[in-house]
């Protein structure tokens, strides 16, 4: 078995094997790294005055972790800048929020070079290298420049946007060309995969060959859809845990016979939180008989607070939730409970189970794991209803959810009404089918299928013979 090297912006293996609070992705990668005696490489999150390239290697939860510090300028230009002010909004179709500054793209390139330079001494000839996400699109190119011939795969956790959107990025061709230095590109959905090949064929003069191989910029790369899942056995166990039961009981007691609609998200403009609040307002306006009989619990943890757009969305949500509560609340009923703190995974599992409706309405999302966690947390004898945006990657798999257009308040308001009225047999039928998918297409299956495809991919993709 080849040794696996995982490279991502941040590195977060669970401190203890089997610890439930780390999240499925970290657990799944850590397990594969342990098994192959691999290395997880990335940024420590710390900054120093001058970049030294000094590696700090340690063992965390049985995994070898290698970390580097970056400079503050790197944090500003690469992380806050190109990654989170340029690529994130653009890839989520928010061209209005995308900032294009040359210092950002220069910083991004510089940090990709720094990653390549620093990880180089760790790479042995038979290692398989797996790069994660939009922070490191250029990494394979930088590694190849330095003579690395190993198989290198890349997985994009966020959407790959439609061609016309991607081409608004200044320097898009250079960025796309860099991706052709990988052996395998993994996307969350067939739609994202097809958007990439559409760009390669129609904007870069490339060709799509049989078997999911795209040729452009004089190189070939394999592409595929590898929808990520959750650690389903771990999450199902978390639901049975004491903290989950406590939270479940506490929530159900506090409902006082009312029904709960639940949203759980990072506080991000891509998650459609304002639109969700407005759709719920529409529901309240259309259904006065439902007042005081239900409420919306929205848990939204703040992230990326250094980026202005995140400060703006936070302020906006405070205003909108406050306005709706002011308009509809009575002395003993608040229609929206809006909470900004983070929950432990086991506590969250209990909250999910207590909710009658899981409301997952991102405007764009690579996958959306909350939808899958909500399903995994349900009581098999009396499951809740999942309402899911058609623009979440998860919608490609979770067809038995109530699929909605999150841009339409009426659409979402109607789905809430339908979900609340849904008979138990229909809830059961839909949930069983959804749970089957969540159980079989879990994070271990995602990891294994990607690694298998990468291992099967021809070593060193560049400069292949013409077909
Ligand atoms: P995210 O945008 O972070 O991930 P998502 O897939 O929904 O989105 O994952 C969020 C995770 O954070 C879930 O596990 C959820 O339980 C947890 N979480 C959210 N709010 C929380 C809170 N208040 N307290 C505790 N936990 C909370 C990116 C992409 C997604 C893609 C994932 C994985 O944007 O589209 O699904 O990567 O590839």
Image (cartoon, rainbow, N blue to C red):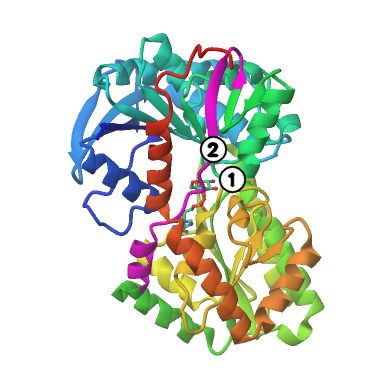
The magenta-colored residue range is 215-239
* Residue 218 appears left or right of 251: right
Position in image of residue 264 (x %, y %): 53, 61
The residue tagged 2 is: 224
Q: How many marks?
A: 2
Crowding around mark 1 (Cα neighbors within 10 Å: few <14, some 14 to 19, many 20+) is many
Q: Are marks 1 and 2 in contact (CB under 8 Å)?
A: no
Left or right: 96, with 387 as reference point? right
The foreground one among 450 and 336 is: 450
Residue 147 lies left or right of residue 91; in this view the side is: left
Q: 404 or 130, which lies in front?
A: 130
Query: Can residue 8 be seen at all in this image of the molecule?
Result: no
Q: Position of residue 174 (x, y in %)?
A: 60, 16
In this rendering, the answer to whether 301 lies above or below 339 is above
> Residue at 71% across / 77% down in the picture?
418
Whether 381 is drawn above or below 161: the answer is below
How far apart are labels 1 and 2 at the CA level?
8 Å
Front-most of residues 390 and 425:
425
Residue sitting at x 26%, y 40%: 33
Residue 51 percent across, percent down from the top left: 34, 16
Instruction: Determine if the magenta segment contains residue 422.
Output: no
Residue under label 1: 189
Dot 1 or dot 2, earlier in sequence: 1
**Quadrant containing the N terminus in the rendered view:** top left
**Going by the picture, which residue comes out furthest to the bottom?**
257
Within the image, what quadrant is residue 173 found in? top right
Nearer to us: label 1 or label 2: 2
- Quarter of the figure with residue 210: top right
Check residue 220 for magenta coloring: yes
Drawn side of residue 20 relative to residue 339, left or right:
left
Residue at figure coordinates x 30%, y 59% from the top left: 20
């Amino acid at each position: 078995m080849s040794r696996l090297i995982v490279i991502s912006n941040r590195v977060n293996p669970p401190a203890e094997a089997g610890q439930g609070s780390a999240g499925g992705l970290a657990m799944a990668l850590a397990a594969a790294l342990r098994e192959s005696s691999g290395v997880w490489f990335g940024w420590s999150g710390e900054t120093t005055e001058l970049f030294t390239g000094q590696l700090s290697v340690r063992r965390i939860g049985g995994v070898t972790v290698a970390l580097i510090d970056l400079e503050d300028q790197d944090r500003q230009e690469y992380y806050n800048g190109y990654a989170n002010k340029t690529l994130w909004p653009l890839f989520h179709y928010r061209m209005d929020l995308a900032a294009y500054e040359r210092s950002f793209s220069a910083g991004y390139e510089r940090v990709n070079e720094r990653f390549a330079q620093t990880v180089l001494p760790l790479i042995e000839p038979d290692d398989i290298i797996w790069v994660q996400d939009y922070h490191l699109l250029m990494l394979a190119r930088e590694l190849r420049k330095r003579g690395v011939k190993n198989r290198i795969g890349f997985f994009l956790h966020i959407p790959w946007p439609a061609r016309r959107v991607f081409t608004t990025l200044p320097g898009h061709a250079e960025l796309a060309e860099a991706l052709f230095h990988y052996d395998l590109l993994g996307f969350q959905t067939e739609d994202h995969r097809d958007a990439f090949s559409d760009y390669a064929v129609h904007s870069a003069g490339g060709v799509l060959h049989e078997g999911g191989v795209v040729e452009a910029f004089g190189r070939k790369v394999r592409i595929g859809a590898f929808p990520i899942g959750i650690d389903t056995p771990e999450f199902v166990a978390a639901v049975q845990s004491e903290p989950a039961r406590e939270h479940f009981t506490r929530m159900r007691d506090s409902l006082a016979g009312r029904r709960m609609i639940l949203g759980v998200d990072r506080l991000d403009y891509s998650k459609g939180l304002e639109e969700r609040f407005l759709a719920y307002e529409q529901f309240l306006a259309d259904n006065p008989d439902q007042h005081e009989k239900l409420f919306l619990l929205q848990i939204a943890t703040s992230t990326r607070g250094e980026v202005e757009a995140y400060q703006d969305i936070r302020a906006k949500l405070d205003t909108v939730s406050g306005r709706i509560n002011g308009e509809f609340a009575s002395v003993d009923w608040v229609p929206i409970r809006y909470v900004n703190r983070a929950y432990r995974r086991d506590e969250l599992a209990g909250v999910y189970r207590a909710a009658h409706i899981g409301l997952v309405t991102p405007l764009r999302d690579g996958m959306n794991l909350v939808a899958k966690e909500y399903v995994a947390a349900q009581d098999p004898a009396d499951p809740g209803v999942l309402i899911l945006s058609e623009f979440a990657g998860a919608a490609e798999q979770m067809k038995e959810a109530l699929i909605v257009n999150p841009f339409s308040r009426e659409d979402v308001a109607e789905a809430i009404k339908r979900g609340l009225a849904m008979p138990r047999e229909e809830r059961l039928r839909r949930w069983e089918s959804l749970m089957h998918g969540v159980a079989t297409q879990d994070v271990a299956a995602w990891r294994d299928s990607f690694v298998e495809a990468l291992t099967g991919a021809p070593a060193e993709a560049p400069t292949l013979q013409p077909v």
